[in-house]
Amino acid sequence: MANTRQDDRSEPWKDPGAMPYVRIDKVTKKFGDFVAVDDITLNIYRGEIFCLLGGSGCGKTTLLRVMAGFETPTAGSIWIDGVDVTAMPPYERPVNMMFQSYALFPHMTVEQNVAFGLRQDKLPKQEITERVIEMLKLVRMNQFAARRPHQLSGGQRQRVALARSLVKRPKLLLLDEPLAALDKKLREHTQFELINIQETLGVTFVVVTHDQEEAMTLASRIGVMNHGEIVQVGTPTEIYEYPVTRFVADFIGSVNMFEGSLIEDEPDYVRVESAELGGIFHVGHGVSAAPNATVWVALRPEKIHVSRERPEGNGDNRVAGVVAEIAYLGDQSIYLVRLAGGRMVRVTQPNIVRQGGGDRITWEEPVWLSWDSSSPVVVTQ
Amino acid sequence: MAWIRALGPYRWATGRLRGWGVTGRTAVTSVPYLWLLLFFFVPFLIVLKISVSGIRLGMPPYDPLVTWAAAQVMDLRINMANYSFLWEDALYRNAYLNSLLVAGVSTVLCLLIGYPMAYGIVRTKPSMRNLLLLLVMLPFWTSFLLRVYAWIGILKNNGLINNLLMSMGVIDEPIVMLQTNFAVYLGIVYSYLPFMVLPLYTAIEKLDLSLLEAASDLGCRPTKAFFTITVPLTMTGIVAGCMLVFIPAVGEFVIPALLGAPDSLMIGRVLWEEFFNNRDWPIASAVAIAMLLLLVFPIMILQRVQGKQMESHR
């Protein structure tokens, strides 16, 4: 899904002449001695869904609140559509926010909640009514216009909050964990609905989330944050397949990380000897690191192949082990394979053939693990 | 305790009580009801009874409600003259109206002073918050009467304020503050402010700050957000605080007696004078009953409003 979406989209971040829609320029936010946001510079382009992804306390929400105007940055500036909004109070910014708690006004009906923003602009009554109805139809909440927030379910509240934040037609919509309060099924459904609404209205979205799956589904680009810094910015594919640090590789999806040293460094390939692995990685991309430097090799569990027979080849990119654990998840199975040195390796295999009978790999069985040289990624920090 | 439960008489007694609808739960909840019944409702009935009797010299100083005209003829006399007298004599009407005015103005003043105080306390950092709340409640540790007396010392002609201002040369002769309406308002606002601040504090503390951020985000300026979001959502606290100030202030006796002018008409003072100076218990009782009725209806209306508010806020 994420891939098809990117294919039919332009990628303005690759065009050096493109004008960023939101420009975060060297923004730092400190609370006392604590640096919540540390000198972040970031460009977000028109029509993007940009996800700020990170664990709790990484500064992603603070950055969002700085963009909304609830926090004044300690240093740096925020530009939206070519205007410096750093000193602008929230009620003057062309930005709306959807709160994690939804922050619906409990003493107002759904309709009054959605109309609230338009009333502040003193629009004619007729126009307010029309736009509120139009927006409630978009989020399919028009039958509930007269209800109060406490009479709605979590998913319905989420949609009212979305309608309320979109009704003013903001240039930029900030969403703080928009789906965190929903259960899994509803969350998946709502993700796609959110994308559809974003494409219909053409609003630029900045989404804060701790859920990497959510970020992968929604985002045109993801900014991974850690300790108040942006560690990597890229499309979901780039982030997943080419993480630049151990943190990113580890944070997005699951990964097997091996420490090793660079024994061969060519422009189109490198070889890494790893004591943990008890073997040698042959990686099909170049690395900028000194010879014999300590590096880490990240290997995704689904990119490892399990077999009983010794794979063919020269001896790189394979290792023997014993199956220690198997977890059957239905669509796939997870194998934990113990290597000779005691290191556990996580391997996932899709269950293409129906399980339950026949000859399949089982506990305590010796196996060979192998992978393609395009699968591992070498990170230097 | 288990051995008690095993005893035959215990089991017999609890079984019997349960048969009458008495369980641990009803026993506990009935205590306040019994208390109110004994010390509020029964005295109320006594006062009601006195209010419909006539005055007489003697002990007790009122006519009995029921007399026996003959052996089997019960003579029940309900004397409504006290109430019609209240209505006819302008003194009582004015006293009522003045009490309502003084209580109303004092309540508004308490609200205007108390709301910013409560808001400020909620917004301070948690370590300071308890200290500030303690300071609000601190006056309760001294006798109410003593605190009102202390104001005499501050307000009188050669009191603290006048002496200070005269020694500084701001004024040449003392400003008359004691025994004025100003002193009464000051006394009531001072005494009842904590009753306003505490319910407001609880209401404001519950207010979700993200609602104010949401309002601001949607283009609402802070002042407007205060009136469209903060005030409606803290209405329960406002209503509770106002009732806690208004109701006792209407019947207030001590403050106008000590700080007010001798001719100031407050219903509490009229009541006192009828009871202790004129020894006209029936009229005094009628004054008390009328005051109660006057207060019960607005309270009932307010409670209905509050009930609706609570419903919509869940």
Image (cartoon, rainbow, N blue to C red):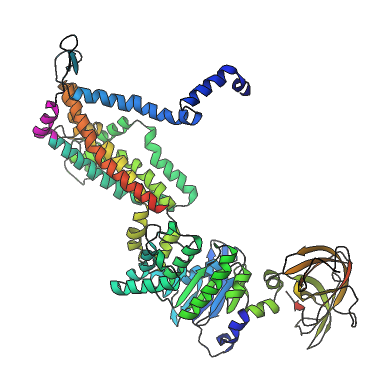
Quadrant containing the N terminus of chain A is bottom right
Q: Is residue A278 visible?
A: no
- Which quadrant of the figure has residue A365? bottom right
- Closer to the camera in the image, A167 or B66: B66
Magenta stretch secondary structure, dominant: helix
* Residue A32 falls left or right of residue B121: right
- Which quadrant of the figure has residue B291? top left
Quadrant containing the C terminus of chain A is bottom right
- Closer to the camera in the image, A253 or B238: A253
Tell me where the magenta segment starts and ends, as one range. Answer: B77-92
Residue A113 horizontal/vertical position (percent): 38, 64
* Residue A224 falls left or right of residue A74: right
Q: Taking A88 as reference, is B212 above or below it?
A: above
Tell whether position A276 is magenta. Answer: no
Q: Taking B127 as reference, is B8 above or below it?
A: above
Q: How many marks?
A: 0
Residue A15 horizontal/vertical position (percent): 57, 89
Q: Which residue does the image show at 43% across and 80% down from the upper left?
A: A83
Tell whether position B82 is magenta. Answer: yes
Q: Which residue does the image show at 14% across and 24% down from the upper left?
A: B79
Q: Is residue A270 visible?
A: yes
Q: Which residue does the image show at 46% across and 25% down from the upper left?
A: B20
Q: Taking B252 as reference, is B209 above or below it?
A: below
Residue B114 horizontal/vertical position (percent): 33, 47
- Closer to the camera in the image, A319 or B9: B9
Q: Which residue does the image show at 26% across and 25% down from the upper left?
A: B45
Residue B47 horizontal/vertical position (percent): 24, 24
Q: What is the residue that sits farthest to the top in this orientation?
A: B71
